[in-house]
Image: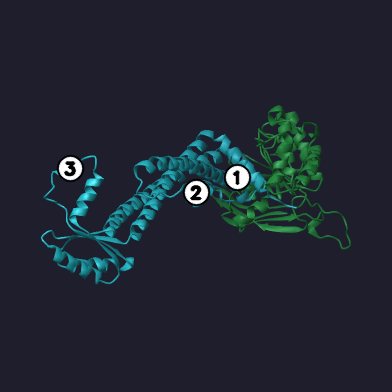
Chain colours: A green, B cyan
Amino acid sequence: MIEFRDVKKTYPNGTVALDGVNLKIADGEFVFIVGESGAGKTTLMKLLLREEKVTSGRLIVRVNRTGFPGGQVPSGNTAEIPRVGTKPGVTEYDLSKISNFKVPYYRRELGVVFQDFRLFPNKTVFENVAFAMQVIGESNRVIKRRVPAILNIVNLTEKFNCYPSQLSGGEQQRVALARALANNPQIIIADEPTGNIDPKMSLEIMNLLVKIHKRGKTVIVVTHEKDLVDYFRQRVIKISDGRVVSDGVGGMFG
Amino acid sequence: MKQYRASYFLGQGIKGLWRNGVMSVASITVLMSCLVVMGSFALLILNIDVNLEKLGLMNEIVVFIDETKDDLAVEEIGAKIRALDNIESVEFISKEQALEEEQARFADYPDLYNLVEGDNPLRDSFVITYQDNSKASTLVYQLGQIDGIAKINHRQDLAASIERVKSGISLVLVWFMAILFVVSIFVIINTIKLAVHARRQEITVMRYVGATNWFVILPFIFEGIIIGVLASGLAYLIEWYMYRYVISMMTGSFSFVTILAFEEIALPLGLAFLGIGIVTGIIGSTISTNRYLKA
């Protein structure tokens, strides 16, 4: 669950990027965040990634890894709880107060996809995905077992040994998505994930995000692409001048 | 099981060093030069110390007798000297003996002293050895009080002037060290900054996938350590070669000077080089990655 409570963000030069944003995103939701350039979408993402700190208000992220709504595990349940990357259970992060020391551990709860992919050109597909796991100190045994499974989700099993330059834009974004999934995060944040790829590939990437969402992940997509937003008919939060101006489930772009 | 392996950071450090070839070579060269200069000064001071100690151990004072004194007066002076405290032995050397010694020393130039025959310009003297070095200045004072002693030559005077030279050299050394140390750190900072710049995209992604500060900066710290280790190793080899060369030059011409064998100083010198090299590398890389120590 992600909750913005009257969040304001003012930059040192006096620009008010967010002005009293109130938002709640539940576990397992799929949300589009739309808005014009300069509306505050990027700031909202930066706050969520804790690249920037909120000026006032509270931003709380409660990560539920139990697989049950609200993190309430029914007694006697023996269902296997995902264990890769993070510990099972519920953890609450108050991003308005979190110490710098804890930020890396918070970020491990997120999977982030960028418009420009941000892959390492000198690493293979396998190594790019494995990198995210190496960074958090995952063992080689776990990496070797898990990376092929993730590449299978994004349909890139055959290309594990290719370098990014040998892949199409859509394929590169799928590698980036695989990397975002590597540590089994509960929240996926995609910043203009289809901005650099053709419409056919865009649809493929969005379908993958929906597939990931169906596995119980919370997916937040920041986008400009009206057609895609209208096509997928999910919750759409529109931001303008630092404020939420519309928020509707199955809503249209406009 | 979460594990970070030192081999990963070491590997990344070596890669970084390789990627910034020219700057890495510059860093290693500057730090190496700094260590060689520092090592050379330190070795010079160590050798001066050994020779000073040797001079001190000689415990010898030579007093020259006023040439107007006759033999009886000289004998009286000898008796007065023997009666003083802290005396080990007193040897009388007459001006004739002294002249013979001088003539023997300059046998190749017989005319030098033959010209003065019959008018010996040298003085009678007593070579005094004493027991306790710490009371030497008292003895020198007491000798000065004896009437008829024209001049007192004390090895400690020589030791004191060498000591002054040594202090001068030490002061120069400290300044040299400080300047070269700062220069080395600056060059290392720049090298590591280039390495950080080359990997800025990687660092951004590391941050987004939850890398801790240490995970981000350790490869650069390792890079600094490698620079330090390589520089100290090269400096050690240069110092070793230079020292052997100086010894071979000096053994013929300056046989009265004691020179420490390289083996005696090899270990402390090597450890000091390695320590300074590593510390400089760590300081340089820590400063250049400091701004990345944020969330």
User: What's the residue at 88%, 59% (across, down)?
Assistant: A77
**Residue hosting label 2:** B263
* Residue A61 image offset from top left, x and y in percent: 69, 55
Cα–Cα span, label 2 and label 1:
35 Å
| 2 vs 3, front mark | 3
The correct choice, above or below, for A191 with respect to A198 in the image is: below
Q: Is residue B140 visible?
A: yes
Snapshot quadrant of residue B144: bottom left
Q: Secondary structure at mark 2?
A: helix
The correct choice, above or below, for A196 with respect to B231 in the image is: above
The correct choice, above or below, for B227 with respect to A21 in the image is: above
**Chain of the residue that carries numbered disc 2 in the rendered image:** B
Q: Which amino acid does the dot numbered 3 rest on?
A: Leu
* Chain-order first, disc 3 or disc 1: 3
The correct choice, above or below, for B61 with respect to A248 in the image is: below
User: What's the residue at 43%, 47% (across, down)?
Assistant: B39
* Residue B52 image offset from top left, x and y in percent: 35, 56
**Residue hosting label 1:** B219
Q: Secondary structure at mark 3?
A: helix
User: Are labels 2 and 1 assigned to the same chain?
Assistant: yes
Q: Which amino acid does the dot numbered 2 rest on?
A: Glu
Q: Which amino acid does the dot numbered 1 rest on?
A: Pro
* Residue A238 image offset from top left, x and y in percent: 67, 44
**Residue hosting label 3:** B112
Snapshot quadrant of residue A96: bottom right
Badge 3: few (under 14), some or many (20 or more) residues near its Cα, within 10 Å? few
* Chain-order first, disc 2 or disc 1: 1
